[in-house]
């Protein structure tokens, strides 16, 4: 019994860790999409954030500074996208894909001489006395700063989108750009800010991987998490708290699959590996079985370029 | 969503197309063009990194006589065949495909390019223009197992597998048999991550094994993340493919390193001389295709001496990891007493030996 309890605790703690980079990346993309910007380049922005964050943290020895650099680098990558897709009105889908590929290449290039350098982790926020409380300790107090920051970010975004005037304007821009423009809102500027926020969050998500989760730089270390974050936004039907739930479902199923195996329970690992994707498909089917429902959830101006004169 | 998916596929193919074009500047009578196809990024600091070290050794050894190129992070599947075909069309006369999952692609493409030499790493299918090569990693695993037997307190040791294929399975079995030299009732727990390279998942696999009581971790995946995870929790571990010691200065006791340079240089020489023939090269500790890095100081001196002795016994063939009697999980004798397993049986090993606490995925 004690064994099962400790396994359950380990699974929960590991789930929060595994879900955190997804939370950051997906919440950033959610804000961008709610403003009508479909940026598929999350994977690229995460990788650029991961490598720049690592370079700064490894050379200064300051992990928090690494996160600031990761956020700025992600914003930088998003700015490239913004200049092309928002100002020059290139196709958002193609531009985002280009950013994903470009970011991966750029990160690999920048990181060439940073491969194989170990990085010391970051001190945990809560003292040992709190962390060693049975059950509650490891679940509530055992995590790193960023896990708590990700929760605050989701709460902040949820509050901003649904409880503030700024959030209302952002959603208006995403739902009906012409009306927002007619009402005098600066559509382009708001989309730029949302895009930069998305980039910063993706950068932090990438930085979480290279600075805390596995403190090292390795090429392509995001291993597809940017694409999962993209799917999560749809999975969450563009709702912040559901993004959090979705990220933990994804993380949790992965972790559970590993723990079940380690416990020696006979289960096909391929089957376990595909469950998160299966879950996404099921959710997609569920939310789209009703055409009006999916239309109600999707920002109506998503991926539509904005011409002020039109 | 459908649009996104289709475009994602198209986007992923783009780098390979570019790679093909880049290599297409063919020249006649110039240097021998050699191409390498890697399953992971060369910055993985593991499997693909070591192959690329081999490529660089070929360049250094032959200088102007060769021109090498590579395509990294090629998925095992339809993409592999396309990349190989482009490599052959671009005039490469010697192509190394460095992952098990490329096997069918190599065989298919080799049929269409009979004048091009293909070498496939860790596979088992050959053709007149397809040779295979591999490292006897299981020898390193066996020594790691003995080390685990000496260092483990809990008699429970862990193995992070990539995919349930013979290469991994023989590693798991050799590790278990090595540990049984010291602890006859040792238990080996196995976690498959279903990837060769995913640092996050590899680290969590290590955590899962440690959560389940394993106090010695070895990995069959390519990133140093498991070593880091073990170091963090103060658990002994062994690095894989390249020297991962600096990721676990206290806890990483050795690394089982793949050294491909000598084989790549030899094959290149044969192709240059026109004497290349399809062969099945399988080098181990004796050929120094598999190398163990110096023991960590945490390994007691008497254990170090024991391990050195074991390594030299394997080198001079007086000890074989799979010498009878070996029983599988069902208790059936798979290697009778007084014999050692044949290479053919090793390469199709699809069973666990007694002591492995895991069921092979059907």
Image (cartoon, coloured by chain):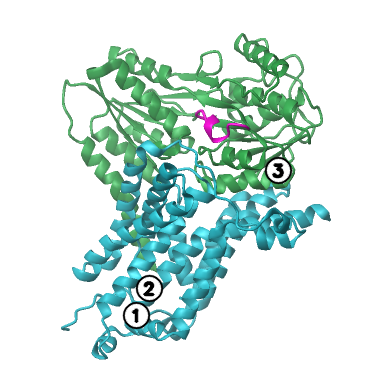
Chain colours: A cyan, B green
- Picture layout, residue A170 above or below residue A104: below
Q: Position of residue B186 (x, y in %)?
A: 78, 32
Mark identifier at residue A33: 2
State which chain disc 1 sits on.
A
Please report the bounds of the magenta region as a residue range: B241-250
Residue A137 falls left or right of residue B55: right
Mark 1, other Cα within 10 Å: few <14 / some 14–19 / many ≥20: many
**Position in image of residue B113 (x %, y %):** 30, 30
For mark 2, give the secondary structure. helix
**Mark 2 crowdedness (10 Å alpha carbons): few <14, some 14-19, many ≥20:** many
Q: Quadrant of the C terminus of chain A?
A: bottom left
Q: Quadrant of residue A165?
A: bottom left
Query: A199 or B114, which lies in front?
Result: A199
Q: Which mark is residue B250?
A: none
- Point out residue B140 in the picture as x, y percentages from the top left corner: 60, 23
Residue topped by disc 1: A174
């Amino acid at each position: 019994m004690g064994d099962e309890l400790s396994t359950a605790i380990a699974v929960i703690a590991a789930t929060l860790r595994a879900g955190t980079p997804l939370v950051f990346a997906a919440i950033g993309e959610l804000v961008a999409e709610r403003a009508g910007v479909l940026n598929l380049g999350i994977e690229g922005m995460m990788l650029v954030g991961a490598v720049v964050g690592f370079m700064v943290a490894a050379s200064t020895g300051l992990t928090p500074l690494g996160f600031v650099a990761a956020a700025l680098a992600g914003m930088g990558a998003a700015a490239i996208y913004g200049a092309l897709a928002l100002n020059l009105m290139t196709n958002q889908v193609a531009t985002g894909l280009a950013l994903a590929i470009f970011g991966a290449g750029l990160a690999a290039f920048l990181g060439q001489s940073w491969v194989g350098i170990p990085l010391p982790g970051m001190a945990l926020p809560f003292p040992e006395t709190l962390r060693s409380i049975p059950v509650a300790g490891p679940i509530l107090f055992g995590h790193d700063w960023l896990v708590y920051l990700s929760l605050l970010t989701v709460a902040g975004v949820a509050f901003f989108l649904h409880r503030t005037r700024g959030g209302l304007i952002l959603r208006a821009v995403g739902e009906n750009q012409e009306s927002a423009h007619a009402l005098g809102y600066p559509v382009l500027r708001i989309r730029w800010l949302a895009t930069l926020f998305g980039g910063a969050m993706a950068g932090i998500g990438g930085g979480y991987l290279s600075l805390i989760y596995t403190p090292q730089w390795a090429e392509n270390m995001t291993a597809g998490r940017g694409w999962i974050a993209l799917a999560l936004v749809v999975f969450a039907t563009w709702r912040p708290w559901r993004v959090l739930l979705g990220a933990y479902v994804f993380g949790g199923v992965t972790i559970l699959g590993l723990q079940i195996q380690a416990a020696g329970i006979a289960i096909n690992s391929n089957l376990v590996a595909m469950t998160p994707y299966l879950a996404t498909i099921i959710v997609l089917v569920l939310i789209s079985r009703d055409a009006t429902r999916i239309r109600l959830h999707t920002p109506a101006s998503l991926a539509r370029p904005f011409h002020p004169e039109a | 969503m459908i649009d996104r998916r289709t475009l994602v596929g198209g986007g992923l193919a783009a780098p390979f197309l570019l790679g093909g074009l880049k290599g297409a500047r063919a020249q006649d009578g110039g240097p021998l063009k050699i191409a390498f196809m890697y399953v992971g990024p060369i910055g993985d600091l593991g499997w693909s990194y070591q192959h690329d070290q081999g490529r660089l050794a070929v360049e250094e050894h032959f200088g102007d006589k060769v021109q090498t190129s590579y395509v990294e992070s090629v998925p095992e599947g339809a993409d592999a065949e396309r990349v190989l075909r482009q490599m052959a069309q671009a005039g490469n006369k010697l192509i190394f495909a460095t992952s098990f999952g490329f096997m069918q692609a190599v065989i298919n493409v080799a049929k269409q390019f009979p004048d091009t030499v293909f070498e496939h790493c860790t596979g088992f299918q050959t053709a007149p223009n397809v040779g295979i090569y591999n490292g006897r990693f299981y020898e390193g695993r066996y020594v790691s197992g003995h080390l685990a037997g000496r260092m483990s307190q809990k008699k429970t040791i862990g193995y992070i597998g990539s995919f349930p294929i013979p290469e991994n399975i023989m590693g798991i079995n050799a590790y278990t048999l090595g540990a049984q030299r010291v602890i006859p009732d040792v238990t080996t727990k196995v976690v498959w991550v279903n990837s060769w390279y995913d640092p996050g998942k590899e680290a969590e696999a290590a955590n899962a094994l440690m959560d389940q009581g394993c106090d010695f971790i070895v990995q069959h995946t390519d990133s140093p993340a498991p070593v880091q995870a073990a170091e963090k929790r103060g658990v002994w571990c062994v690095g894989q493919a390249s020297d991962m010691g600096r990721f676990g200065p206290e806890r990483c006791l050795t690394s089982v390193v793949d050294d491909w340079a000598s084989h790549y240089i030899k094959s290149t020489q044969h192709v240059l001389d026109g004497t290349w023939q399809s062969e099945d090269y399988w080098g181990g500790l004796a050929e120094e295709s598999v190398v163990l890095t110096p023991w960590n100081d945490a390994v007691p001196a008497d254990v170090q001496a024991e391990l050195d002795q074991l390594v030299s016994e394997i080198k001079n063939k007086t000890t074989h990891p799979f010498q009878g009697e070996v029983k599988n999980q069902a208790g059936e004798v798979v290697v009778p007493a007084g014999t050692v397993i044949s290479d053919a049986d090793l390469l199709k090993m699809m069973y666990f030996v007694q002591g492995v606490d895991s069921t092979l995925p059907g």
